[in-house]
Image (cartoon, coloured by chain):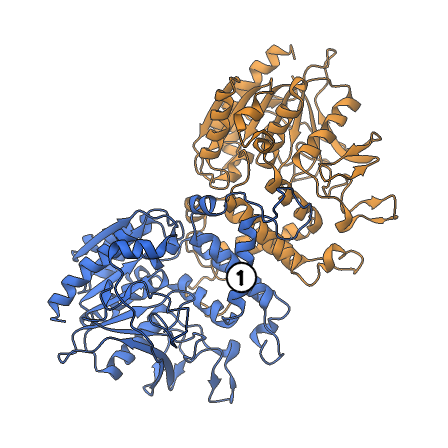
Chain colours: A blue, B orange
Amino acid sequence: MAATSQANIEGAGGSVGIVVPRALEITEPLTLDCGRTLPQHTLMLETYGRLNVARSNAILICHALSGDHHAAGIYAADDRKPGWWDSAIGPGKPIDTDRFFVVALNNLGGCRGSTGPTTINPETGQAWGPDFPIVTVRDWVRSQALVADALGIDCWAAVVGGSLGGMQVMQWAIDCPTRLRHALVIAAAPRASAQNIAFNEIARQAIISDPDFHEGRYAEHGTKPSRGLKLARMLGHITYLSDEAMRARFGRLLRGGDGRFSFNYDVEFEVESYLRYQGQSFVDRFDANTYLLMTKAIDYFDPARDHGDDLAAAFAQARAKFLVVAFDADWRFSPSRSREIVNALVVADRDVSYALIDSPLGHDDFLMPLPDYHKVLRGYLSRVADEVSA
Amino acid sequence: MAATSQANIEGAGGSVGIVVPRALEITEPLTLDCGRTLPQHTLMLETYGRLNVARSNAILICHALSGDHHAAGIYAADDRKPGWWDSAIGPGKPIDTDRFFVVALNNLGGCRGSTGPTTINPETGQAWGPDFPIVTVRDWVRSQALVADALGIDCWAAVVGGSLGGMQVMQWAIDCPTRLRHALVIAAAPRASAQNIAFNEIARQAIISDPDFHEGRYAEHGTKPSRGLKLARMLGHITYLSDEAMRARFGRLLRGGDGRFSFNYDVEFEVESYLRYQGQSFVDRFDANTYLLMTKAIDYFDPARDHGDDLAAAFAQARAKFLVVAFDADWRFSPSRSREIVNALVVADRDVSYALIDSPLGHDDFLMPLPDYHKVLRGYLSRVADEVSA
């Protein structure tokens, strides 16, 4: 991926610069889909750009499985790793911080500072661990709505998200129809397929069956289920790239220079090296209990379920205008899944635009600065900015 | 799958009845691709039908990743589980035992009685375990050629196999061009793609990282890497069914009767139950060291490699006539992989027929009695039988 040069072709824009995350205390009780109530919770968030006087130019960014509140900018002048969607968020970028006030948060149940398995349960004084409830996409929307209240935002100019983030966007449009003008649903699906659930289940079983999991109480045992979490992440990466992208990137290249097979089980093909590296680096930065509940949130997401399995009926109550974006080589949530969303929106007589992007990588492309993709985002959001006088 | 009724539509044929496996001792030394030499080895095999006087009507069945020598028939009158390809092999069936002498064996390195990790290494008096060499598809063909010698078969009427079995068929045609008249390559690929290797690698890592693996010496520790082997098999099953087939079979059905989510990590969706069952039953019947070496044999298979990455050049030395069969919903070894084989054979000026079968399941369909599939096998092999006066 020549990401930089592609970004330049499209007009890269600048960086939001050094950002400081903050913790937002939500003191309003939150009743979850599982029936339990959190009397209070904390969410980590970052904001970029300035809220206008009319408070009409705010954009909410919803993150995917392993994302967090650090969507753009850097933490120090020598920080070489910007936020996970820095290519799209910044001054002059598609999500233009010269015009929008952008809010990114770490979802409830996350492991980057928001209330979740790794934070302290005030009732016990211990980390929640596996006692933290399994939250749903609907719960996240409820929690994010409380964030909007706290920030004084009655109505988002747009709610934007890719993958599991796109599921949150749909749920926003259904559950809080008057609180967003635009819904940008990127590389998502209206619900997980049996194959999606199968991948998630194997990832969960890898974690749960790791002897270091200790029924989720690994922190108390001074360990963590590294083997299982590593396998789970390796498995995820298979679904983030298309077969063709893997072929183009790794082919059957061998790590060793002499081109001979090793006849052992050490790392041998380049693709093995890539997966092991991705798996290991994930173990160093992510929590297994959070991974479990995030995958379960994907499996549970199914807005049609409450409407007789009729997605159009679910969308009938939405008022937002939709942009649905799919990537042609994405096989995790393929374009046909995005078309299900689009078709249901059309049936529900909603305003929807659909963009199918030529995609070199597959699902991972929703994070990439592909020129056609960024042109679509830029064009759409430029109109939104005009609309809200941002 | 209404397998029985479909088989009836096509004309099911009968059973070969009760069969008795036997152990064939190969006393000829076998030098392997890894450089090591086995002074002798034993292969378990079954035969069905009768070898004709001209010894021209023999068919070799090559098995896939988890297959063995029990391809057809039953072991006792009350045995409810026939061999793994019983739908295709028997009197009046596509591989017609009234006309052909059919040989099925458990490959070298297997775990059903053939010399492999679970058998005794004569040099040490202990089970081979992880000291058993990683064998290749080429090694298997060498070993199978010694079986042909032992049975007095100079030339197979056909060598037949699906998936990894199809890879052996191609290697036979390349390495022993005068020893087979027909090569039936079913649901195979000319080599593993990066994605295929990625799936195999995660399966291997699941096994190897299981604390009960003990570097392959689990038998000595009185244990086995059940968790890892279960995960490996669950992962395999994802690739055996298409997304559509999983949707049709499981959808988002819940196990519980009340249609409510459990908000825990117990088995919940039907597809989870299916995968856990498949994984567990595999652990009870398969050896982890064998699984490791079988997946490595897939990854190493690459006949073009010795011919400047030119598959047509590899096939140039073949003399057999080919039937290549692919299944349209197969995403493990998709039809485009079969077309690579067909195209290379055409370029090499070989005789090749290609059949693409409408497929309800995906890769697993190579084991199923689909009417169109069995008609193709029956038609092709009927001509072969006439040719060899069987």
Say whether residue B251 is visible: yes
- Relative image position of residue A259 (x, y in whole percent): 61, 42
Q: Residues within 10 Å of mark 1 (few under 14, many from 20)?
A: many
* Residue A387 horizontal side relative to residue A182, left or right: left
- Secondary-structure class at tag 1: helix
Viewer-closest of A341 and B132: B132
Q: Residue furthest front?
A: A78
Residue drawn where x is 28% and y is 56% of the image: A8
Where is residue B82, by image quadrant?
A: top right
* Residue A178 horizontal side relative to residue B91, left or right: left
Where is residue B358, by image quadrant?
A: top left
- Relative image position of residue A365 (x, y in whole percent): 36, 54
User: Which residue was labeled with disc 1?
Assistant: A279
* Residue B263 horizontal side relative to residue A317, left or right: right
Residue drawn where x is 60% and y is 17% of the image: B319
Residue drawn where x is 25% and y is 78% of the image: A148
Say whether residue B19 is visible: no
Amino acid type, mark 1: Gly
Viewer-closest of B75 and B163: B163
Where is residue B177, by image quadrant?
A: top right
Which quadrant: the C terminus of chain B? top right
Viewer-closest of B87 and A113: A113
- Relative image position of residue B52 (x, y in whole percent): 72, 14
Viewer-closest of A314 and A376: A376
User: Where A209 falls versus A70 (above or below)?
Assistant: above
- Relative image position of residue B105 (x, y in whole percent): 71, 32
- Report how many numbered discs are placed on residues in the image: 1
Q: Chain of mark 1?
A: A
